[in-house]
Amino acid sequence: MSINLARNSLGAGAFAGAVAVMLGAFGAHALRTVLDAGAIGTWHTAVEYQFWHALALLAVGVIAQRRQDRALHLAAYAFAIGIVLFCASLYALALGAPRWIGAITPLGGGAFVVGWIALALHARKT
């Protein structure tokens, strides 16, 4: 079971990192002249959080190669869900999505917090 968690977390983290690079470049080059400064700032925040949590998924994958438990599984799922909810909602808002999409963002932020707490609980058990 730990091999699947390790493989899945490493794969998801690497994919999320690659997408963050592409979206960061897209924002810096293609959107720079299209969006206002506030929207570019929102886009940049999404890219930054996506990068950090891609790295967190990679860390979970490395840790899972040695030892895994429910807390580590929870951390992986929470980081992935956070990337989707938090970052995707910010990307959408930057591109002009309806403001109600912003209600999704805190759910993703909460998922990030759950992921970090779960990772801390896992570390406490080692």
Image (cartoon, rainbow, N blue to C red):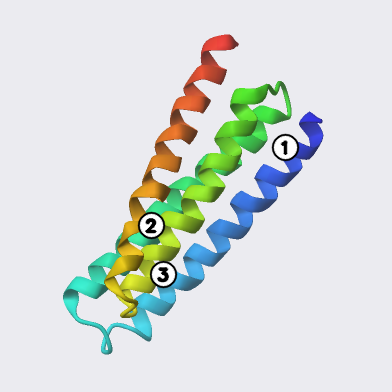
- Residue 104 in the image, given as x and y percentages of width and height: 38, 57
**Mark before the other along the chain sequence, 3 or 2:** 3
Residue 41, compared with residue 114, is above or below; it is below
Assign a secondary structure to mark 1. Answer: helix
Q: Nearer the viewer, mark 1 or mark 2?
A: 2
Q: Is residue 101 left or right of residue 1?
A: left
Q: Which numbered marker is on residue 24?
A: 3
Q: Which numbered marker is on residue 6?
A: 1
At x 36%, y 76%, the residue is: 27
- Residue 102 in the image, given as x and y percentages of width and height: 31, 62
Q: Which residue is mark 2?
A: 104
Assign a secondary structure to mark 3. Answer: helix
Q: Which numbered marker is on residue 64?
A: none
Residue 103's image quarter?
A: bottom left
At x 64%, y 52%, the residue is: 12
At x 40%, y 48%, the residue is: 107
Please identify the quadrant where the C terminus is shown. Answer: top right
Please identify the quadrant where the N terminus is shown. Answer: top right
**Type of amino acid at the residue the image marks with label 1:** Ala
Q: Are marks 1 and 2 in contact (CB under 8 Å)?
A: no
Task: Answer few, some or many: residues within 10 Å of disc 2's Cα (few below 14, many 20 plus, some between 14 and 19).
Answer: some
Residue 103, compared with residue 35, is above or below; it is above
